[in-house]
Image (cartoon, rainbow, N blue to C red):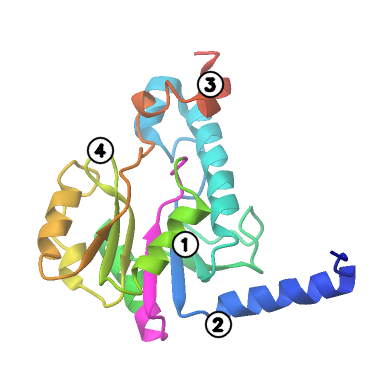
Amino acid sequence: MSSIPQNDKKKEQMVVDRDDKDSKNLLLIFTRNPELGKCKTRLAATIGNQKALDIYNFLLQHTVVVTKDVKAAKQVWYSEEIWEKDIWDAGIFTKKLQQGADLGARMALAFQEGFANGFERIIIIGSDMHDLTTTDIDQAFKALSTEDTVIGPAQDGGYYLLGMTTFTKGVFQEKAWGTDTVLKDTLTDLHDKKIHLLETRNDIDLYEDIKDIKAFQPYLDMI
């Protein structure tokens, strides 16, 4: 097979980028600004603030890699302030600022804005899932072609991915965010919806979540 000329490759990439922007799929990525002492605080309680920050930056890089080629418009929602020059390429990721009193309110706003802007399938993920792959996200969008909702359960009783085809207000209300009841309560709110469950995956919050995973050993060797 003959190789594609370099100029044609560039044109092909431009078409892919434009198609992603025009897609009816929207991927929301919620992230904390990576600052010392302000991220992965439960992990930092065991390994210290600097190592927790190093691990979080490692997870952010992983999230960039697994999301940049997803066939969807992509938005990064920052917790504190929008950083114009960081690992999130503005040519791929639209940058937004989270707003709301708690996590539920902030996620609800992002979903509402997405549906108001004409997106038909919206998925939200965090930025600290080492187990997450591009294929997982693509399969989740595919599931939304036939199901109302898709959820990726986390081992800690929460979820690492939530996708919907219509806005369901109750999902974002009256939740004890960060506890082991979030998934159960969310499924109760969605009792009348067609739900597709992904594989249960490991969320990264505590030392126990990473101590036996090879990829994190360089960060833990000095403990």
Which of the marked residues, 2 or 4, is nearer the chain's N terminus?
2
Labelled pair 2, 3 in contact (Cβ < 8 Å)? no
Q: Provide the residue designation for mark 4.
A: 156
Disc 2 vs disc 1: which is toward the camera?
Answer: 1
Tell which of 218 and 4 is nearer to you.
Answer: 4
Element at badge 4? Answer: loop
Q: At which x and y percent is residue 95?
A: 54, 67
Q: Which residues are magenta?
A: 114-130
Residue 154 location (% of width, % of height): 29, 43
Describe residue 138's horizontal placement relative to residue 89 as left or right: left
Q: Which type of secondary structure does the marked residue at label 1 adopt?
A: helix
At numbered mark 3, what does the secondary structure look like: helix, strand or loop? Answer: helix
Which dot marks residue 149?
none
Seen from the viewer's position, the closer of residues 56 and 71 is: 71
Nearest-to-viewer mark from 1 and 3: 1
Residue at numbered disc 1: 138
